[in-house]
Amino acid sequence: MYPGKLDDKGRLKLAVGFQEYLKDKPLFVTSLDRTIARIYPLSVWLERKKALEAFTGDEAEAAEHIQFNAIDLGSEAQMDSQGRVTFSPELRTELNMAESPVRIYGVAEWVEVITDQAYQQKRNAAISGTPAALTALKKAGFK
């Protein structure tokens, strides 16, 4: 997990490892939950979008809500030569990222960006939930 901050133009400088992974790829920058930003390679986002569109029945409405969030806040981007990715004004405003420090980390095939405030909330929840979570996982076979 790396610290970061968006500059006055809404650009986030990425760590070298993330730069290497995202280099020369068209990107899609968005949020599914209006809390955590995601930087997807566009090809990965298109796979996720297709998966959301495939839901039927009870899950179809949930998938529509998630897809709406992604489209409402999302924008295509390209990493510049200095390893910066621009976040849309709508995304920055919704997630209160303009003035807040952020934390950057890799998840599966995308990069997540979380504000310090949201990080602290998740951290506190993880700390208080760890004993029960560890017990449950051990029962399920985690070693």
Image (tube, rainbow, N blue to C red):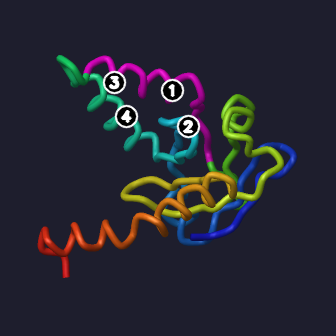
Q: Position of residue 86 (x, y in %)?
A: 70, 44
Q: Are marks 1 and 2 in contact (CB under 8 Å)?
A: yes
Q: Nearer the viewer, mark 1 or mark 3?
A: 3
Mark 1 vs mark 2: in front: 1
Of label 4 and label 2, which has the lower sequence position?
Answer: 2
Front position among marks 4 and 3: 3
User: Which label's residue is closer to the chain start, 1 or 2?
Assistant: 2
Task: Tell me the tag on residue 69.
Answer: 1
Say what amino acid the circle numbered 3 marks.
Ala
Query: Is label 3 or label 2 in front?
Result: 3
Q: CA distance from mark 1 to mark 4?
A: 15 Å
Q: Secondary structure at mark 3?
A: helix
Residue 131 location, quadrant = bottom left
Question: What amino acid is labelled 2 in the image?
Answer: Thr
Give residue 90's quadrant in the image: top right
Q: Which residue is mark 3?
A: 62
Report the span colored magenta: 60-78
Q: Which numbered disc flags the more N-terminal residue, 1 or 4?
A: 4
What is the CA distance from the residue labelled 4 to the residue labelled 3?
18 Å
* Circle 2 SS class: strand
Quadrant of the snapshot with the N terminus? bottom right
